[in-house]
Amino acid sequence: MRETLGGSATIVAADYFQSYSVVGLLALAGVLFVAAAFGAGRLLRPVVPTPEKLLTYECGVDPVGEGWAHTQVRYYVYAFLYVIFAVDSIFLFPWATVFAAPGYGGATLVEMFIFLGFLAVGLLYAYKKGVLTWT
């Protein structure tokens, strides 16, 4: 096949790799620009460490007490459940567009009720486990 094509196969390959070389050069230029900016910042900034500057703070407030704080796990469970149901609700939008297409109405309706059934079982499980009670 190469004999019939002659040099056209090497021309196509050269064009293919040339487009990647442009991307590579652009990425290299970006990395060099960021490195130059950080290097200039390091050379030009004043370095005067004082105990006040080395003190840990959060939101401009000096720390009080220990640095270790216990967080209740139930807050993470609420956040995790929210993320699960928010992501799952995203699947409802494509379903709504496919449901209107001719020939797909019945099948997509059944599939969506199966999907919503799985979500309902998960929510019922969380409710039975007592995860959804705020204490």
Image: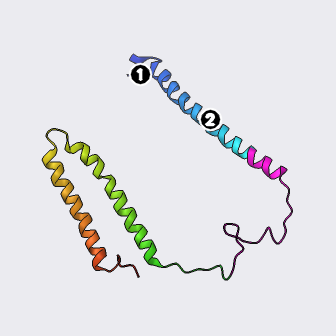
Q: Of the residues tagged 2 and 1, which is closer to the observer?
A: 2
Quarter of the rendering containing residue 113: bottom left
Q: Given the image, on which type of amino acid does mark 2 rest?
A: Leu
Tag on residue 2? 1
Residue 63 falls within the magenta-colored stretch: yes
Q: Which residues are magenta?
A: 37-64
Quarter of the rendering containing residue 46: bottom right
Colouring style: rainbow
Residue at 74% across / 45% down in the picture?
A: 37
Say which of 125 and 38 sits in front. Answer: 125
Q: Quadrant of the N terminus?
A: top left
Residue 45 is situated, as x and y percent measured from the top left of the image, at: 83, 53
Seen in the picture, residue 116 relative to 102 is either above or below; the reply is: below
Magenta: main secondary structure: loop
Residue marked by disc 2: 26
Q: Given the image, on which type of amino acid does mark 1 rest?
A: Arg
Earlier sequence position, callout 2 versus callout 1:
1
